[in-house]
Amino acid sequence: MNQASLECRHISLSYGATPVLRDIDLKIEPGEFFALLGPSGSGKSTLLRLIAGFNQHQSGELLVDGQDISAVPPHLRNIGMVFQNYALWPHMTVGENVAFGLEERRLPRATVREKVGRALDLVGLAEYAGRRPGQLSGGQQQRVALARTLAIEPRVLLLDEPLSNLDAKLRHHMRRELVAMQKQLSITTIFVTHDQEEAMTTADRIAVMHQGVIQQVGAPTALYDDPVNRFVAEFVGTINLVPGEASAGTVASSLGTVGLPAGSGSRTGRVEIAFRPHSVALSAAPGNASRHWVAATVSEREFLGEFVRYRVRAGDVELIADQPHALGDPGFAPGARVHVGVDPGQLRLIPA
């Protein structure tokens, strides 16, 4: 497969007076597995369809390998797209579905047979070539749709929430297969999802979108550890946010005063103190002196298998604390008085 770079330069798109994409600036590297992550209505699917050629922007440039393809019709872009509903022809066999795009290109029959066989081998469905889509499971249909797209050897592969119709166990299995296949082919891939777990377990980098604006771009760990604003902090994982006031190397809040976390520089003024639930310790009494401890009351307890999620009330602030579950450990019941220990090294400050 060819590796292609893709770049959006100041792309904007509106439907009438309603802006859908606002000044999108984005560069995707050759061979990268890139995710567009955001809630419904954030513009991620609109951007994906724009790259495919099904939507047209009013301003900006769309470049593949440095060439602007904004005016190139979809069938000439050599960009492959796997749709959310797979869009398989029910009256055709699996082999005929995979061959469809190749036959539209009027390739010789021998070439079509070779490419269909190679694509079905790649997704592990060679023995299903004679079946119809209705005879396949959801996961198999998803792989047929992927094989049909890969058969045309696209420069860029677009995936529009391709796992959303699968049950949880199959979805987990298929995303591992997608990652393995993408690494094997080294094809530039753009994956749209509203599921932050899917994005973080598949993508090399992620663009978080909200209201048609790219909020932050980075590796999964960068987005999780260092969100640039409240939206990213809350959308990528679960987080505690506590209003505070930063000054003179410290930050004061209803939890008390702690030193500014690393990387905060000389920030002053109103901020929000951000920290993840798994970095919070719960104890019957204050513990390790390296943590900042405050008294609290357990308001809710939720057993999630490998960990227990507590919601605790510390003064006027509700916090979430995820504690590892151990066999025989009764934990804390709602109403219990506890102490919450926050590690200052795990704190981050984001604009209020």
Image (cartoon, rainbow, N blue to C red):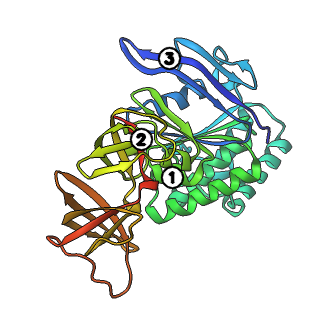
- Closer to us: 141 or 69: 69
Quarter residue 283 falls in: bottom left
Q: CA distance from mark 3 to mark 1?
A: 27 Å
Q: CA distance from mark 2 to mark 3?
A: 41 Å
Give the vertical position of 59 relative to 38 (above or below).
above
Q: Do the residues bearing badges 2 and 1 touch, measured as CB atoms within 8 Å?
A: no
Q: CA distance from mark 2 to mark 1?
A: 38 Å
Q: Position of residue 33 (x, y in %)?
A: 65, 44
- Closer to us: 333 or 271: 271
58 left or right of 15?
right
Can the viewer see residue 93? no
Marks 2 and 1, the one that precedes in the sequence: 1
Task: Write down the residue under mark 2.
Answer: 249
Give the vertical position of 38 relative to 339 (above or below).
above
Q: Position of residue 277 (x, y in %)?
A: 36, 59
Task: Write down the residue under mark 3.
Answer: 12
Residue sticking out furthest to the front:
248
Residue sticking out furthest to the left:
335
Marks 2 and 3, the one that precedes in the sequence: 3
Badge 1 element: helix
Badge 1 density bin: few <14, some 14–19, many ≥20, Cα 10 Å: many
Task: Write down the residue under mark 1.
Answer: 198
Residue at 23% x, 49% y is 254
Residue at 44% x, 29% y is 43
Badge 2 density bin: few <14, some 14–19, many ≥20, Cα 10 Å: some
- Closer to us: 325 or 143: 325
170 left or right of 98?
left
Q: Position of residue 73 (x, y in %)?
A: 65, 19
Residue type pointed to by label 3: Ser
Residue type pointed to by label 2: Gly
Residue at 32% x, 84% y is 329
